[in-house]
Amino acid sequence: MRTPKTLAPLLEDGLIDHVIQPLRSGKEADLFVVATAHGVRCAKVYKEARQRGFRQAGLYQEGRTVRDSRRGRAMAKKSRFGRHEREEVWQNAEVDALFRLADAGVRVPTPYLCIDGVLLMELIVDAAGEPAPRLSDLILTAAQATAIHATLMRDVARMLCAGIVHGDLSEYNVLLDDKGPVIIDLPQHLNAVANNNAAAFFVRDIDHLTAFFGRFAPSLAATDYGREMWALYQTHALQPDTPLTGIYHPESTPPDIAQVLREIDAARREEEHRQARLAAHAEASHAD
């Protein structure tokens, strides 16, 4: 097939031999199957910020630190250099997360390199050597759904113990090969400790999976692993091998006063901004 423009530099540098086929187009990247000197790989071509489907990227990136102060200042000012640096941080965040999760025992694709907006990584394949399907493409038996769900809950617990919340986890971001589920697409992951939105995104991730698997195994629809795990995590009681029940009793969990105060403060700031916008609009209308 014709080489996409974004992959031409990798072809010229000998990092890939040729593009075999397009694999999938997503909200943050386009994926291609490529041939390299080391075998068949997956090339993930990131889309520019204005093309991505994540409209509230700031919610995901809260708590991510940049060691280089110059880069940090440029990103805050949103200059041309700052926007370029922000894109690099967004892309490299996925590589960092993949290595951290692999070390934590979570099944994720192995990354090889990230250059010029392209992540070259392991191609997950099925038993026949074809690109592995997403969960969303499969019809499961109740037994299959229960087994895959249990594996994913254990992997999500390992992720949380490693301080990572996926932030966009669903049946569309999990592949299934002959060994089980593989979690993909992590550029938007959240810092579980430093991001005030982590709890909400974590519970939403698990709720998405619960709704999907509950279609095939109705008994899973009534579980609440997300809130159970987060409550354990908040009290430092969650370990990668902590037994999970899927049952959550909010009345037995002490309230997170700090979180309540943060939410109140956020609501106050939002109202102040709203009032400022209304005042500015009124002033502009009066001037007209």
Image (spheres, helix red, strand yellow):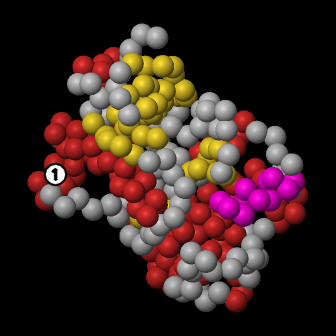
How far from the left and from the top, in percent, is residue 115?
A: 27, 36
Please give left or right for residue 64 compared with residue 81 in the image: right
| Dominant secondary structure of the residues highlighted in magenta in the image | helix
Residue at left offset 78%, top offset 68% = 223
Please tell me which residue lies in front, 50 or 135.
135
Please give left or right for residue 223 compared with residue 153 in the image: right
How far from the left and from the top, in percent, is residue 173?
A: 59, 45
- Whether the magenta-drawn stretch holds residue 167 is answered as no
Residue at left offset 81%, top offset 53% = 144
Q: In the rendered view, would you say 125 is above or below 73?
A: above
Please tell me which residue lies in front, 134 or 260.
134
Q: Quadrant of residue 288?
A: top left
- Whether the magenta-drawn stretch holds residue 150 is answered as yes
Q: In the rendered view, would you say 36 is above or below 158?
A: above
Residue at left offset 69%, top offset 69% = 225
Residue at left offset 70%, top offset 89% = 252
Q: In the rendered view, would you say 257 is above or below 270?
A: below
Which residue is labeled 1 in the image? 71
Kindly tell me whether residue 119 is visible in this rendering.
yes
Kindly tell me whether residue 200 is visible in this rendering.
no
Please give left or right for residue 175 compared with residue 282 in the image: right
Please give left or right for residue 278 compared with residue 229 in the image: left
The amino acid on which the numbered mark 1 sits, given as a three-letter code, is Arg
How far from the left and from the top, in percent, is residue 23?
A: 54, 26
Span highlighted in magenta in the image = 142-152
Q: Secondary structure at mark 1?
A: helix
Mark 1 surroundings within 10 Å by alpha-carbon count, few (fewer than 14), some (14 through 19), many (20 or more): some
Q: Name, please, the residue furthest toward the left.
A: 70
Please tell me which residue lies in front, 210 or 129.
129
